[in-house]
Image: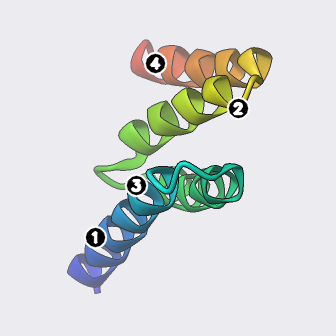
């Protein structure tokens, strides 16, 4: 079951990357949602997913949202 969770997270992560690369704001929004799911599961891709979310938020003109996400990463790595 653990490997299934890891595979699921990896699949979601790669689906998010694909959506982000669509060069479409709707794709970016979908990627943010998918990255949230990956980040929320706490697996090995969680921190990378959070970072990718921040990049997308910034690219969409929402730097304040990006900073919140980056703060979460910084605070997590110092715990």
N-terminal of the pair, mark 3 or mark 1, is 1
The part of the image, by quadrant, that contains residue 27 is bottom right
In the image, which disc is placed on residue 6?
A: 1
Q: Regarding mark 2 in the picture, which secondary structure is present there?
A: loop
- Alpha carbons under labels 4 and 2: distance apart: 30 Å
Residue drawn at 69 percent across, 49 percent down: 25
Q: How would you rate the neighbour count of disc 3 (Cα within 10 Å): few for under 14, some for 14-19, many for 20 or more? A: many
Q: Position of residue 5 (x, y in %)?
A: 34, 76
Judged by depth in the image, the label closer to the viewer, 4 or 2, is: 2
Q: Regarding mark 4 in the picture, which secondary structure is present there?
A: loop
Circles 2 and 1 in contact, beta carbons < 8 Å: no
N-terminal of the pair, mark 4 or mark 2, is 2
Give the residue at mark 2: 60
In the image, which disc is placed on residue 17?
A: 3
Q: Regarding mark 3 in the picture, which secondary structure is present there?
A: helix
N-terminal of the pair, mark 2 or mark 3, is 3
Judged by depth in the image, the label closer to the viewer, 3 or 1, is: 3
Circles 3 and 1 in contact, beta carbons < 8 Å: no
Q: Position of residue 17 (x, y in %)?
A: 40, 55
In the image, which disc is placed on residue 79?
A: 4
């Amino acid at each position: 079951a653990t490997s299934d969770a890891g595979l699921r997270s990896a699949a979601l992560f790669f689906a998010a990357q694909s959506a982000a690369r669509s060069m479409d704001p709707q794709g970016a929004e979908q990627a943010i949602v998918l990255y949230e799911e990956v980040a929320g599961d706490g697996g090995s891709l969680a921190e990378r997913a959070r970072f990718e979310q921040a990049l997308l938020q910034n690219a969409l003109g929402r730097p304040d949202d990006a900073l919140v996400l980056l703060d979460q990463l910084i605070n997590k790595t110092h715990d």
